Every structure is written in structure tokens, then in C-alpha cells.
Amino acid sequence: MKDYVQAVGDAFKKARSEQGLTLESVAEKSNVDVRTVINIEQYRGNPKLEKLFPLVRTLRIDAREIFNPEMQRESPSIRQLRFLIEECSEQEASTLLPVIEAVLSALRSDHATEIK
């Protein structure tokens, strides 16, 4: 259980820090007591799902990061891209798919100019 508590606390701290949020703002946005957020980040306690779920949603944490901590090594850009895609409707995703494939193909081609 200790690994789980550490993974949750680390994921919360990282997401909150990257988004520039305070403990109080996270608690307010997720409608969870600030002491719960503090306890999670200090590796104390075992939050119930009804507390954990709104916090994960508020912080936009990919739940796989909690259960697969190695995902925390992803860059913030990759995580942001993953969340943008996951929020797309099916129609938006099918419209974006050929565009993304074309851009990636161009970026990966031997003749691609370095993007700065």
C-alpha cells in the first residue's frame, strides 16, 4: 500500500506544481477539504474514491500515472497532448487524425526543416 500512497502523492504534487495551483485552489475546484489534499501530498492516509476521483479530474491527472508510476516520466507536452486528444469528440478525432498523421510524417521525413 505504501507504493500506492507515494504514487498518488507524487502525481498530485507534480500536477499541481506544473499548473501553478495552490492546495486551497485544488481543494476548492474539486470540492474536497484542503486537509485531504495536504494529507495526500504528504503521503498520509488512503483517500477514498469519492475524494480521489474529483481531485484526479481537477488536476487532469491521467489515472494511469497513479497505477503505472513510470508514466510520470512523460514530458508535460506529451501529457497535455494526450489530454487534448482524450477530450475530443469522435467527430473531432476523426477530423484531426489525417492532419496529425500528415504533420508527423512531415516532421519525421528526411527533408524536414528543424522547427524552432
Image: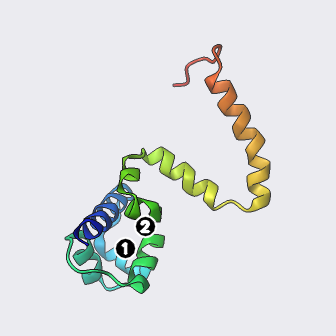
**Which SS class for mark 2?**
helix
Residue 29 in sight here: no
For the question of whether residue 78 can be seen, the reply is: yes
User: Crowding at label 2, few (<14), some or many (≥20) Cα neighbours within 10 Å?
Assistant: many
Instruction: Tell me where residue 40 appears, x and y as whole percent.
Output: 26, 74
Q: Amino acid at mark 1?
A: Val
Name the mark on residue 26: 1
Instruction: Choose the circle earlier in sequence order: 2 or 1.
Output: 1
Q: Answer above or below: position of 42 versus 112.
A: below
Please name which of the two marks, 2 or 1, marks the residue nearer to the observer: 2
* Distance from Cα at disc 2 to Cα at disc 1: 7 Å
Q: Badges 2 and 1: C-beta atoms under 8 Å apart?
A: yes
- Please report the residue visible at 60 percent of the width from the left and 55 percent of the height from the top: 84
**Image coordinates for residue 43, horizontal then vertical, percent:** 21, 71
Three-letter code for the amino acid on which mark 2 is drawn? Leu
Residue drawn at x 23%, y 80% is 45
Query: Height in image: 116 above or below 57?
Result: above
In the displayed structure, 110 sits above or below 69; it is above
Q: Nearer the viewer, residue 102 or 33?
A: 102
Residue under label 2: 59
In the rendering, at what x and y percent does residue 1 appear? 26, 72
Residue 106 lies, in percent from the top left, at 68, 25
